[in-house]
Amino acid sequence: SAATFTTLSSMSLIGRHDAIGAVRAVLVAGHGTVAIVAPPGGGVSAFLDEAVVEATELGVPTLRAAGRAAESNVALGLLRELAARDDSGELARGLNDATDGQYEQALLDWAAGTQPLAVVVDDTHLADVVSGRALDYLARRTGNTSVVLVVGGHEATQLDALELAPMTVDELISVLAERFTDVDEAVARRVADLAEGSPLVAIEVTRTLDDAQRRGSAPLPQFPVTATPIRHAFDVAIRDLPDATRRALCVAAAEPTGELRVIAAAIDALGESLEALDEAEASDVISIADGTVRFDHPIRRSVAYHQLPPASRRGAHRALANALDAPQDAERRAAHLAVGVTVPDERIAADLELIAEAAERRRDFVEARRWWTAASQLTPDGHEAHRRAERANAAQGGDADPLAGLTKAERRVAAVVGAGATNKAAAETLYVSVKTVDAHLQSIYRKLAITSRAELAVLVTHADLAGAPAAG
């Protein structure tokens, strides 16, 4: 609701110029109606904030109210809220004097007799039936008044409504850059992808990140926990599902690929049935097609995952790890095992190191930091844990040194070989044996998760080592 979220007015203009133009037009005309609709988190409340700003700048007084879930069954609840905010007291008198329930006419009579005024109503989908009917009645007749009515909600109404289109990734990045001055662009892009066009989801997810995560120097959580109002918006379709369905949903949410074969095996291993997902599919929380389970929104997936206690979530990850027994699934298996264990385990930590190196090779430094950090936390040996933590710190993003994890000797070998020298030529240049060069190259290839000199040349060029002094 409007009381829950506050957003800088300029942010709500990003990607919303047509809708704001419609509000300005009716404000200038002195009467008219604009109805706005968008999914939860789609920016309706922020847009209505901007409508109030526009009215204020044009000298038009505003009267604001919002539908509330707790009062959706209370007749006249929303109209009474408007009346309580009407300083003239005329609306309250009109409602009290209404006979035979003629509240629609009472609201219109009040609007016809008032001075220029902007009435802004949020969350109309939560309005009680009586108030909703009265607002619809007024919306069609504002031409006979001096009232501008701007209403917004998450569900389509009988009014002709402007639908706020989902923001593009670039627009969401602009919103986050303006709202959070310390957010790294790669982090903003990852959050924007998660938000799927929702500015409030993007803002609330970013708000839950700590300073290091926003700067990109710490890994992002796999399942971000959004602020309570956003969670409630996405929890509605899950909270009343049967317990078995909620447990199965947690397993489905824990497997990011949505591969039905793996999810089904894990659910079965936990003593549940895949049919438990039928109710979730009937509620449109998920869809199952082409061997894949898909959630209707990434935040719904996060809510489905977090609605069970940590021990149950760890059990889901262990079951998924056991279901991933093919050689090509090694990385996914290790990722699940890492979340499913509670004590250090070098075997798992070593597997996570391979995942981190693969992420670095594809230049995904956000993921690399995540897996290096997870590997360090699961490492029993203190020295190895420190080394892996240092690798996490070194994965700073696209402008970072891609060779930061190498020793000084390895960097010298990388610089010479990456510039095109053969092993023999490198040995002569560095005054070492060919065997030493071979050993260093094997270590370099393993640490950088590469398999060729061409790949090494690219990394050396990126690190600006080409032509660097060979020794020293």
Image: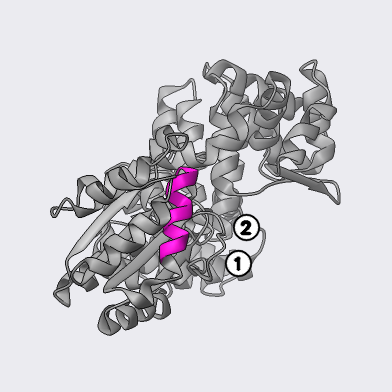
Q: Residue, x 23% and y 58% (percent of image)?
A: 63
Rendered view: 250 above or below 205: above
Judge the density around disc 1: few (<14), some (14-19), many (≥20) Cα neighbours within 10 Å. Answer: some
Secondary structure of the residue carrying numbered label 1: helix
- Name the side, left or right, on which 74 lies relative to 267: left
Residue 455 got which mark?
A: 1
Residue placed most toward the observer, 309 or 78: 78
Q: Residue, x 83% and y 49% (percent of image)?
A: 289
Question: Residue 4: x percent and y percent?
Answer: 31, 44
Asked whether the viewer can see residue 35, the reply is yes
Question: Residue 79: x percent and y percent?
Answer: 34, 47
| Callout 1 amino acid | Glu
Question: Residue 66: x percent and y percent?
Answer: 35, 48
Residue placed most toward the observer, 52 or 384: 52
Quarter placement of the C terminus: bottom left
| Callout 2 amino acid | Ile
Question: Residue 245: x percent and y percent?
Answer: 72, 26
Mark 1 or mark 2, which is nearer the start of the sequence?
2
Secondary structure character of the magenta stretch overall = helix
Residue placed most toward the observer, 293 or 62: 62
What color scheme is it? one colour
The answer to if 228 sits in the magenta stretch is no
Rendered view: 315 above or below 320: above
Q: Residue furthest front?
A: 99
Residue 450 got which mark?
A: 2
Residue placed most toward the observer, 186 or 382: 186
Which residues make up the magenta segment? 127-138
